[in-house]
């Protein structure tokens, strides 16, 4: 019955395939053509199904994996299982959803954060930095924020794109949330100039750390 269920779900995802959506997604490195609003509607109907989620993940199909991350039980995964999944998750959307929807809610998140941040694979390391940014914002106790700034200052400029993006987010988060490090965070951003020329849509905040930090601090002061 489970196999039939997987087959039925795969058929449903295939029916939702939209060439226009695929073209847009592929520009961002994501190889699927399912509208994410429609994908979420499928997940809402299926509700939480851990076994089905694991089976959908093993298909290797990007849309199926995104659906799996929406219907899984985040706390049910062991750290070794999540480590394997992260190394298999090579498309940006699957990587981001795995970290944000599953790993952050898993009891092994801190263990994985430490291991991944030091990993030689820059995509894996970027997940570690994303988890570090989460801690900077929500649970900074015990983090060496000055040490993190040292690493960012030394390594962010020449880091591969996804790792650079994650380190830059951490830099901005430290500057936004921790006033005692704000001047240093802005100074690092101004000297390294990372993402200074990133195309930013109207009404969106630039990811260039000095602008990002200043804008978010301004917003907080107005509340």
Image (cartoon, rainbow, N blue to C red):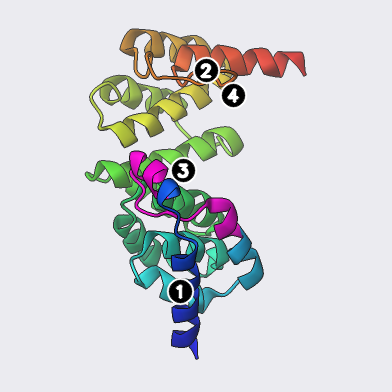
Q: Is residue 197 magenta?
A: no
Please name the residue that numbered disc 2 is placed on: 212
Please name the residue that numbered disc 3 is placed on: 131
Earlier in the chain: of badge 4 and badge 1, it is: 1
Q: Give the secondary structure at mark 4.
A: helix
Which residue is located at x 31 percent, y 47 percent?
124
Q: Nearer the viewer, mark 4 or mark 1?
A: 1
Q: Which mark is residue 56?
A: none
Dot 1 surroundings within 10 Å: few (below 14), some, or many (20 or more)? few
Which residue is located at x 54 percent, y 19 percent?
205
Q: Nearer the viewer, mark 3 or mark 1?
A: 1
State which quadrant residue 48 falls in.
bottom right
Which residue is located at x 56 percent, y 21 percent?
204
Q: Position of residue 212 (x, y in %)?
A: 52, 17
Please name the residue that numbered disc 1 is placed on: 11
- Image height check: is 50 above or below 110? below
Marks 3 and 4 sit apart, C-alpha to C-alpha, by 16 Å
Residue 212 versus residue 67: which sits nearer the camera? 67
169 sits left or right of 75 in the view: left
**Quadrant position of the C terminus in the picture:** top right
Marks 1 and 2 sit apart, C-alpha to C-alpha, by 43 Å
Earlier in the chain: of badge 3 and badge 4, it is: 3
Q: Which residues are magenta?
A: 22-40
Marks 3 and 1 sit apart, C-alpha to C-alpha, by 34 Å
């Amino acid at each position: 019955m489970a196999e039939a269920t997987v087959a039925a779900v795969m058929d449903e995802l295939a029916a939702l395939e939209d060439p226009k959506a695929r073209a847009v997604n592929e520009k961002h490195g994501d190889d699927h053509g399912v509208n994410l609003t429609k994908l979420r509607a499928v997940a809402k109907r299926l509700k939480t199904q851990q076994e089905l989620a694991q089976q959908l993940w093993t298909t290797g199909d990007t849309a199926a994996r995104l659906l799996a991350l929406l219907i899984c039980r985040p706390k049910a995964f062991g750290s070794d299982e999540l480590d394997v999944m992260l190394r298999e998750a090579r498309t940006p959307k699957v990587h981001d959803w795995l970290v944000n929807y599953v790993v952050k809610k898993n009891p092994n998140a801190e263990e994985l954060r430490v291991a991944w941040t030091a990993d030689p694979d820059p995509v894996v390391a970027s997940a570690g930095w994303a988890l570090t940014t989460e801690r900077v914002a929500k649970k900074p106790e015990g983090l060496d924020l000055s040490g993190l700034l040292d690493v960012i200052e030394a390594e962010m400029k020449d880091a591969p794109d996804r790792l650079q993006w994650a380190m830059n987010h951490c830099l901005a988060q430290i500057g936004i949330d921790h006033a005692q490090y704000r001047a240093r965070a802005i100074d690092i951003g101004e000297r390294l100039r990372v993402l200074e020329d990133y195309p930013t849509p109207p009404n969106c905040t630039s990811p260039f750390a000095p602008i990002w930090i200043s804008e978010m601090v301004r917003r907080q002061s107005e509340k």
